[in-house]
Image (cartoon, rainbow, N blue to C red):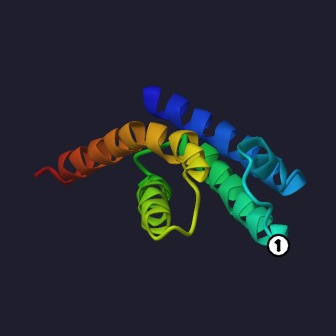
């Protein structure tokens, strides 16, 4: 039950965030006082991908154990995104303000996604009879 609720919340968040970035690509930069990108279409492309992840999370919410690969790919993105941010931040390529996206896009989803994958692993052993 909690898995489906967590995935639906992630889905709704990702779809809304994706729509925001696609429809208003410069708004985030205005809010944070960051320089606007020269090619906002790249940022919009990121918004599209994140919105599509939302659809995947919605579909996975109906049977998280069965659709664990969607959750695994999502968790990997939510781990590698912050790693990429910190590498770029320490190289002086991105301001700290960009890190605000990590909180809601990535960090808050680590625990529920990890717990879903842990339950999946446990269920695979139970289903095999091992």
Neighbours of disc 1 within 10 Å: few (<14), some (14-19), many (20+) = few
Report the residue that reaches farthest toward the right. 23
Q: Is residue 6 left or right of residue 56?
A: left
Name the secondary structure under disc 1: loop
User: Residue 120 at x, y = what percent?
Assistant: 31, 47
Above or below, 103 against 87 in this view is above
In x, y percent, where is residue 81? Answer: 49, 60
Q: Residue furthest left?
A: 130
Q: Position of residue 98 (x, y in %)?
A: 60, 52
Left or right: 3 with respect to 32? left
Q: Quadrant of residue 112?
A: top left
Picture coordinates of residue 125 (x, y %)?
A: 18, 51
> Is residue 100 in view?
yes
The residue sitting at 50% across, 57% down in the picture is 70
Q: Quadrant of residue 123?
A: top left
Seen from the viewer's position, the closer of residues 59 and 50 is 50
Residue denoted by label 1: 38
């Amino acid at each position: 039950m909690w898995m489906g609720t967590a995935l639906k919340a992630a889905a709704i968040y990702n779809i809304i965030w994706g729509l925001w970035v696609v429809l208003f690509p410069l708004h985030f930069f205005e809010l944070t006082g960051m320089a606007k990108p020269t090619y906002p279409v790249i940022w919009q492309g990121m918004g599209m991908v994140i919105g599509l992840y939302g659809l995947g999370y919605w579909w996975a919410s109906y049977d998280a154990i069965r659709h664990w690969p969607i959750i695994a790919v999502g968790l990997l993105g939510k781990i590698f995104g912050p790693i990429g941010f910190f590498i770029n931040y320490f190289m002086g390529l991105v301001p700290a303000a960009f890190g605000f996206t990590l909180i809601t896009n990535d960090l808050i989803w680590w625990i529920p996604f990890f717990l879903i994958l842990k339950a999946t692993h446990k269920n695979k052993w139970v289903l095999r009879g091992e």
